Amino acid sequence: MSKLKRSESGAIMIEGALSTLFWVPLLLGVLYFGSALVTALQVVQVDRDAGHMFARGVYFGTDTAGYANETLLARLGQQLGLASVDGSGNVTGVSTTGPMVIILTKIQNVSANACVAYNGVVGGCANVGDWVVTQRLNIGNSTLRQSNYTPSGVPSADLDPTSGVVVNGTNGNYTYPLYLQDSSLRLTGFNLITISATGFPTDTPAYLAEAFLQTPVVPGFPGSGGLYMMTIF
Amino acid sequence: MVAQATQFRRARQKGQELIEFTLMVFVILGFFSLIIDISWMVFTRATLQYAVREGCRWAVANGYDNPSIVVPNPGNIASYEQPLIQAQVVATSMGFLNSSTPLCSGAITSTTPLCININWYAPSALNTPLSITATPPPNQSPNVVEVDVVNFKQTPLLGIFIEKSIHTFTFNAGSADVME
């Protein structure tokens, strides 16, 4: 009897230590996913706010006026690292070196009528029937991620570097937007919106807002390293 | 002799399990405390985010030209509407905020005390809040409304690992949209 008790000495400690190997990672996982969930909610909200304002015509270009407007987005995403702050902690603008980027894209499906309206365009309208990018703006640290809807040529030379709007070409006395024929602006394979007579019409802009937040890579947690959200208006 | 040794060993082992159990309980409780406190912070953050989103949504849908709002003083509708937006934020904040949480407006700085900050902006100048007493009233399309909860401080619930008296967490939450 006494030998048995002696062999049991420290058993609880050992069992506890062994079970720790199970429940500590479990609890840390719960914490990680809980925290990631709330962060994801914040990213969604900033993304949606930015996208809705963009769709309603708020200007977020890279010039002085646009940058001032971006400051509002910086405030909304301050706790996500979207803002640059001064020494006193006041938001001064969007951080271009932080862990977050918001990509705003205006797209539309080109109809044959659009081409006719511009007198046929020199060389024809190669993009009839295609979704094309007509505006693209990167807010924040644009080196973090490209848009999921980036055609090979975007950001293209045909997009104004300040406003992100596609520039015009000329056809005799006519000017026409280059998205009618610049194949590098096509969104090949884009199928999130279906064009139909009773549904979404051609030549009507749709607005994509993508947000990406860089997060620490946690070994063993698939998907760690970044949160990506996209909304369409 | 053998019986004496056994008795001595038993006496020595008395309470050993209790000590081991106690040590383990402290570790386990510490971890649970950590879990609860971090969850509390996560919950706070999510709730404030939800509250400002609801407040902003209400503000967007109930602007100057909304006929459902009976305005006692049409010349000052924005300042009249601010407490209504504040009430929406408070109502959806699950008790974190209350009616005594002050309203504020104007630029937010790091020294702004706890308040519900409500501002309207012209869409071309989103860093310069419009005066709430301006004419025409700022709370109408196509202006932008921003609703923030500024400098909300939260202390840990249990505070075993995160000491209550040392760690206070500060949260800001904001939402903005174009007036409808």
Image (spheres, coloured by chain):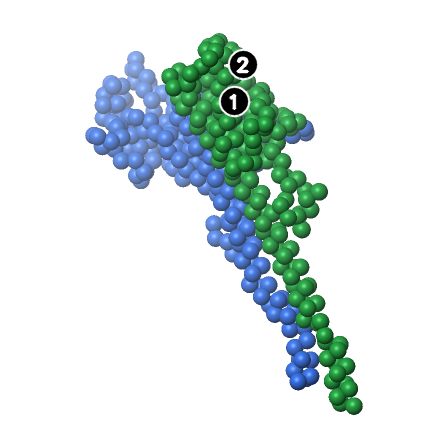
The answer to whether residue A18 is above or below residue B95 is below
- Residue B137, given in percent of the width and then of the height, sits at 47, 13
Sequence order check: which comes first, mark 1 or mark 2?
1
Residue at figure coordinates x 59%, y 35% from the top left: B171
Q: At label 2, which amino acid type do we have? A: Ser
Residue A42 is left or right of residue A178, and the answer is right
Q: Which residue is at a point 58% across and 66% down the rendered structure image?
A: A19
Q: Chain of mark 1?
A: B
Q: Quadrant of residue A116?
A: top left
Residue under label 2: B131
- Measured from the top left, where is residue A215 in percent x and y? 54, 44
Report which residue position mark 1 lands on: B83
Q: Are marks 1 and 2 in contact (CB under 8 Å)?
A: no
Q: Residue at x 42, y 21 (%)?
A: B62
Judged from the image, the secondary structure of the residue bearing numbered disc 2 is: loop
Q: Which quadrant of the structure image shows residue A131?
A: top left
Q: Chain A takes which shade in the image?
A: blue
Residue B102 sits above or below residue B167 on the image: above
Q: Quadrant of the C terminus of chain B?
A: top left
Tell me the residue at 65%/82% (across/down). Answer: A4
Amino acid under disc 1:
Pro
Q: Colour of chain B?
A: green
Q: Quadrant of the N terminus of chain B?
A: bottom right
Residue placed most toward the observer, B158 or B132: B158
Q: Position of residue B89 (x, y in %)?
A: 50, 30
Q: Considering depth in this image, is A214 or A1 the residue closer to the camera?
A: A1
Labels 1 and 2 in the same subunit = yes
Mark 1 secondary-structure assignment: helix
